Amino acid sequence: MAEYQFPSEFSGFHFHFVGIKGTGMVALVEILHARGAVITGSDVSERFYTDEILEKLGISALPFSEKNITDSVRFVIYSSAYSVDKNPDLIEAKKRGLPMMLYSEALGAVSGTSYSCGVCGVHGKTTTTGLCGTLLKELPLDSQILAGSIIKSFGDSCVMTKGHEYFVAETCEYQRHFMAFEPKKIILTSVESDHQDYYPTYEDILQAFVDYICKLPEGGQVIYCADEKGACQAVEKALARRSDIQAIPYGENASGDYKLTFGRVESGVHYFTVAALGECALCVPGDHNVRNAVAALALSCELLKTAGKNPGDYSECLKNGLRNFAGGKRRSEIVGRAKTPLGQDVIFIDDYGHHPTAIKTTLAGFKEFYRGHKIIVDFMSHTYTRTAALLEEFASSFESADRVIINKIYGSARENADSASVTGEILADHAKKYHKDVSYAGEFGEAAELGLSFLSEPSGKDFPDGYVFVTMGAGDNWKVGVKLMEKLS
């Protein structure tokens, strides 16, 4: 935990954010602003989508300067991208002896002021958190939800606020950041090898999730995916240490209230049954998102029980909430539509999937959901270490796409690209072993030209409805879709 504690009341309390435009930082700004805090912040001049959120709150990002640390500033929250010894705001705050916290520490401090629930897992955190907030909007619970991206049903915000007795937040495993959080309940979606620069082995990342589960208080609940091997292993190990923890499974392999039975996909709606609620429906694609929806239903029902209410009395509210969920930014997000030169329809989708399992399940979901469409995916792998460690898994993850374009690797600032053992071109060569139609286009302009040539051909009799063009990855290859839409317009 951080050295400092937040006040119990935030009204009039002045926080200064360094790196305020970051997605997580903006979400935390929204949380504190909704609770009455005074907010200032600094960042680079480049415009980001988060600027719109800040503008709605009446906040302008200032240039970095020691002058930002005025006498009224009581607390400084900063992004890990900025050094305490190099950033002028942080140097001045340190000189004045002001309390300073990293974003992850500050989120943990906020969690200590409410009945808090953490959503964690290698995959599905943002969507599951967004689903939780969309459901809780429908329920008589004072609640505040923080997601790691903009959620459409939150009014294009990262945060949903209707009180803050209950607080649900996306919590991140990288560098064990979630260990600062103080959960009473946890959703665990999945555990797989990832972040190889910090967790060299699967056992390393598995242990981090076990330690997080063991932060639960006596009688705390972990709601876990019974269909996911890593989640089951983490819960089993945690229960061996802490038999007092309540383990609540959800999924096809679960028993009890949250057993899932998949149903039909029809007219853009995925139907499924949950034991405690009956038939439900979700309007976003993919079996993985159905599982995320069941996780959110489970947490919502357990929170109702905590508040002394019967979940059965709110089954229609919960089902309406599911129907209202329209996804999040860069999570199977429909970013535009266009016509090909031959007049066929193209749906442009952008998705953050950057792990082989996420790529495979997301594309499989698109294939089922958009039957009659030919699927073209433009993929940009994120980090050299992840790509090298999971090269064959990445290479074999595109089976549900009809054509594949692979870009250069989006490196991390913490890596040395010159010494990397893998490139985007190497990934493309390996992918050709598993898929008959893979092309390498390192730069975005090249990828857009290639995409245009593909879309200039007839989709074929097996794809009467046209095309789906997907940009996928944690990099900035969403620009390929933008360039391609501009060409088609």
Image: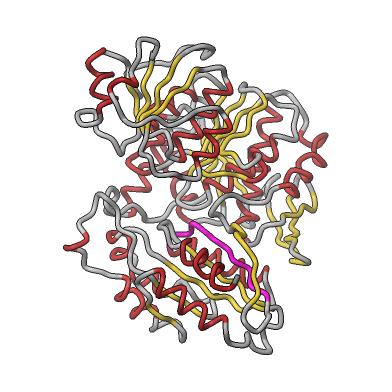
Residue 349 placement: quadrant:
bottom right
Q: Which residues are magenta?
A: 345-355
- Image quarter hosting the C terminus: bottom right
Residue that appears at 49% across and 17% down: 38
Q: How is the image coloured?
A: secondary structure
Q: Is residue 219 magenta?
A: no
Q: Is residue 381 left or right of residue 35?
A: left
- Residue 239 seen: no
Residue that appears at 40% across and 58% down: 475
- Residue 128 seen: yes
Where in the figure is residue 140, as x and y percent of width and height? Answer: 75, 27
Q: Is residue 414 above or below residue 94?
A: below
- Image quarter hosting the N terminus: top left
Which of 366 and 454 lies nearest the eye of the viewer?
454
Residue furthest left as drawn: 419
Q: Is residue 349 magenta?
A: yes
Residue that appears at 67% across and 43% down: 153
Where in the figure is residue 404, as x and y percent of width and height? Answer: 47, 77
